[in-house]
């Protein structure tokens, strides 16, 4: 299997498995999303990037998922019929935060440019 294909299959399967977890610290189903999965070339490890709704703390969710990683790994192995599922490392996805910060900085620059252009008259 190619790496992008494995990444996609793991992402989809993990999203389903996380929705099935019964842990009150994870909040309502649907508040947690698996944003991306990156598997190492030897398929021994997978970094799983997690996004959560604003109402819950991403670090808490990641900690809960990391504690459930062994069980999730076994379920992945069975669901995807893998001889050996990769070791899972859950990581908070900060791409949305970075994108929002970049947009904020660009908006501030645009405002400063408008002020600078208005003062030259």
Image (cartoon, grey):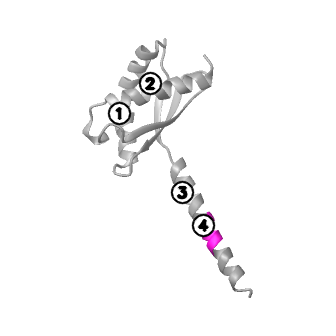
Of the two numbered discs 4 and 2 in the rendering, the one whose residue sits closer to the viewer:
4
Of the two numbered discs 4 and 1 in the rendering, the one whose residue sits closer to the viewer:
4
For image coordinates 56% across by 63% down, the residue present is 104
State the residue in front, 115 or 35: 115
Q: Dot 2, crowdedness within 10 Å: few (<14), some or many (≥20)?
A: some
Could you tell which of marks 2 and 3 lies nearer the N-terminus? 2
Report the quarter where the C terminus lies: bottom right
Report the quarter where the N terminus lies: top right
Q: Which residues are magenta?
A: 106-111
Label 1–label 3 contact, CB within 8 A: no
Could you tell which of marks 2 and 1 lies nearer the N-terminus? 2
Q: Dot 3, crowdedness within 10 Å: few (<14), some or many (≥20)?
A: few
Say which mark, if any, is on residue 67.
1
* Residue 26, magenta (yes or no): no
Distance from Cα at disc 2 to Cα at disc 3: 28 Å
State the residue in front, 5 or 116: 116
Distance from Cα at disc 4 to Cα at disc 1: 40 Å
Say which mark, if any, is on residue 90.
none
Say what secondary structure mark 3 lies in: helix
State the residue in front, 8 or 60: 8
User: Mark 4 — residue?
Assistant: 107
Q: Residue furthest right?
A: 120
Counting from the top left corner in percent of width and height, residue 40 is at: 59, 27
For image coordinates 38% across by 51% down, the residue present is 54
Q: Dot 1, crowdedness within 10 Å: few (<14), some or many (≥20)?
A: few
User: Mark 3 — residue?
Assistant: 100
Distance from Cα at disc 1 to Cα at disc 3: 30 Å
User: Mark 2 — residue?
Assistant: 13
């Amino acid at each position: 299997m190619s790496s992008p294909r494995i990444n996609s299959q793991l992402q989809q399967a993990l999203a389903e498995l996380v929705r099935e977890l019964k842990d009150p610290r994870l909040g309502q189903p649907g508040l947690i999303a698996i944003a991306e999965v990156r598997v190492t070339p030897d398929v021994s490890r997978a970094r799983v990037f997690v996004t959560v709704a604003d109402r819950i703390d991403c670090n808490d969710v990641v900690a809960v998922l990391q504690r459930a990683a062994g069980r999730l790994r076994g379920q992945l192995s069975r669901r995807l019929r893998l001889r050996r599922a990769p070791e899972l490392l859950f990581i908070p996805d900060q791409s949305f935060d970075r994108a929002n910060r970049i947009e904020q900085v660009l908006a501030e620059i645009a405002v400063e440019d408008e002020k600078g252009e208005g003062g030259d008259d």
